[in-house]
Amino acid sequence: MGTLKTEFEVECPCCKATLIIDEGLKRVVRHVEVERADKPKLDEAHQILSAEKARRDSLFEQSVAAEKGRGDALSRRFEEALKQAQQEPITKPKRDFDLD
């Protein structure tokens, strides 16, 4: 697409994209991104999707295993806290009102 006489091209210093700016409108009218070198090919889509599925499944299995072990750990902590509470003497808690 051609540019008008009032339009000029500028390269973005950050992303190296081409910006087409209209002098009369004083704004960007078109933005053309640079082709990425690491852009995935459509032929590799099946491989990429299967690799991502395997990664998701692995993470899910890890979270399931962690949740199964979590209940045991919480019950152990509860039992330890219960034993400690039974060993401590029972005392009446002091209130601010009692200190006056």
Image (cartoon, rainbow, N blue to C red):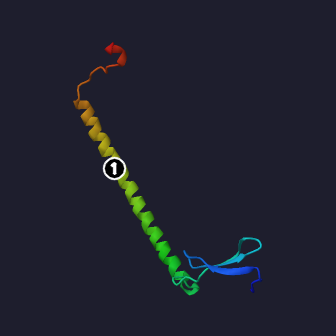
Say whether residue 97 is left or right of residue 46: left
| Rendering quarter of residue 36 | bottom right
| Rendering quarter of residue 55 | bottom left
Say if 61 sits above or below 75 in the image.
below
Residue in front for this viewpoint, 87 or 95: 95
Image quarter hosting the C terminus: top left
Query: What's under tag 1, amino acid-wise?
Result: Asp
Say if 70 sits above or below 90 in the image.
below
Q: How many marks?
A: 1
Residue at 77% across / 83% down in the picture?
Answer: 5
| Rendering quarter of residue 87 | top left
| Residue 61 placement (x, y as % from top left) | 42, 64
Residue density around tag 1, few if under 14, some if 14–19, many if 20 or more, within 10 Å:
few
Image quarter hosting the N terminus: bottom right
Assign a secondary structure to mark 1: helix
Residue at 74% across / 75% down in the picture?
Answer: 23
Residue marked by disc 1: 72
Residue in front for this viewpoint, 82 or 17: 17
| Residue 45 placement (x, y as % from top left) | 55, 81
| Residue 52 placement (x, y as % from top left) | 49, 73
**Residue at far top of view:** 100
| Residue 80 placement (x, y as % from top left) | 27, 40
Say if 13 sits above or below 86 in the image.
below
Residue in front for this viewpoint, 26 or 54: 26
